[in-house]
Image (cartoon, helix red, strand yellow):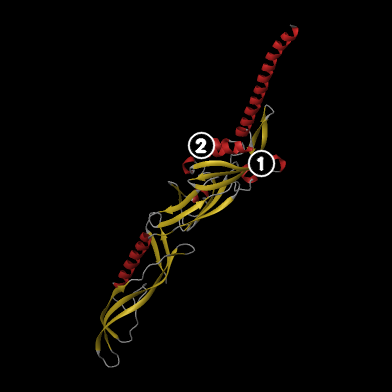
Amino acid sequence: MSGDGSGIRTRPLLLWAGIGILLVVAFAAAVGAVQRAFYSPAGFVTAYVDALASHDVATALSMPGAAPTRAALTSARLPADASRELLRSDVLPKLTDISVRSDEELAGGEHKVTVHALADGSAVTADFIVRPAGSVLGVLTTWEFASVPLTVAHITVAHASTFTIGSHTVDPRAAAPDQPESAFSVAADYLMFAPGRYELGHRSLYLHADPTVVSGSPGRTTEAVVDAQPTTGFTAAVQKQLNAFLDECAKQQVLQPAGCPFGVVIDDRVQGTPTWSIVSYPVVHLTAGATAWTMDQAVGVAHLSVTVQSLFDGTVRQRESDEKFAVSLSSVTIRPDGSLDIVVAD
């Protein structure tokens, strides 16, 4: 009887022991899952990129080591005065298909975590360097960015004063105010989130730039140039003003209109007053100069009608002649009010 009773008492103990083992295993698995999701280098970086995907700028920048302080930017060898104007949710691209491609342990306990995603449908990749920052209950390691995870775009706007990003128009002189109001090209440094893909451009009444794509890497500076070029409207406006200038020249009833690109010298005696008309206007082609738009020499034709008397035999005749001339523009600038300032070259 005693042998049977001992067997009965052993079975509940074995049952509870098995349950205990299962609970320990489940707890360890749960801790491991939490550690992988929240307390691992990959989990920390994923949380950061997920915040960007949600356009939650405040959360992303509040993560340990993410704030772009002057000290952090200087330590990362990034421009300490870079503008924060583009660290805003409404210029962030749509991030999807976020995945960690690799987690490489570096010297000193740091990790390089490589993240892949789609930014507005285009593939982007970013490497983040993180390091241990402490622990929770002595078991779960917390992490922080070892270097600020932002990128810097040095944006140059050639031949214009602003650029567009999304629905916004940005003036680099606000970020770098030492540039003169009349500068033909402007530039400034801008902090931007990574991974990302940003399209920059320019659109105004007289200028247009094809999209320039910026896709920087954390902790690095990338160069971007927005190359503004004349629109057909700009060329037409300059052509109109040049034609008007030549028409005014043609109103001068002299052989050599003052300040004008055409004129003739006649050795015979002129009777009456010469009259000019423009047969064909030079065709405007604008190119970017060092400080303004310019136009190389273009050819036009003016018609002269004048009565002359020969000094040799005294005969009188009506001279009708087409006179070719060349004109160039040394400076074409767009004033702040949108009007044009055009200087005809001497």
Quadrant in which residue 160 is drawn:
bottom left
Along the viewing direction, whichever of 27 and 135 lies nearer the viewer: 27
Label 1: few (<14), some (14–19) or many (≥20) C-alpha neighbours in 10 Å: many
Residue 121 against residue 28 in the figure, above or below: below
Of the image marks 1 and 2, the number of the one nearer the N terminus: 2
Q: Is residue 328 left or right of residue 133?
A: left
Residue 293 against residue 187 in the figure, above or below: below
Residue 28 placement (x, y as % from top left): 66, 27
Q: Is residue 243 left or right of residue 171?
A: left
Residue hosting label 1: 111
Q: Is residue 148 in sight in this rendering?
A: no
Kind of residue at disc 1: His
Which residue appears at 31% of the width and 73% of the height?
Answer: 280
Seen as rendered, the residue at the extreme bottom is 313
Q: Are marks 1 and 2 in contact (CB under 8 Å)?
A: no
Residue 213, numbered circle: none
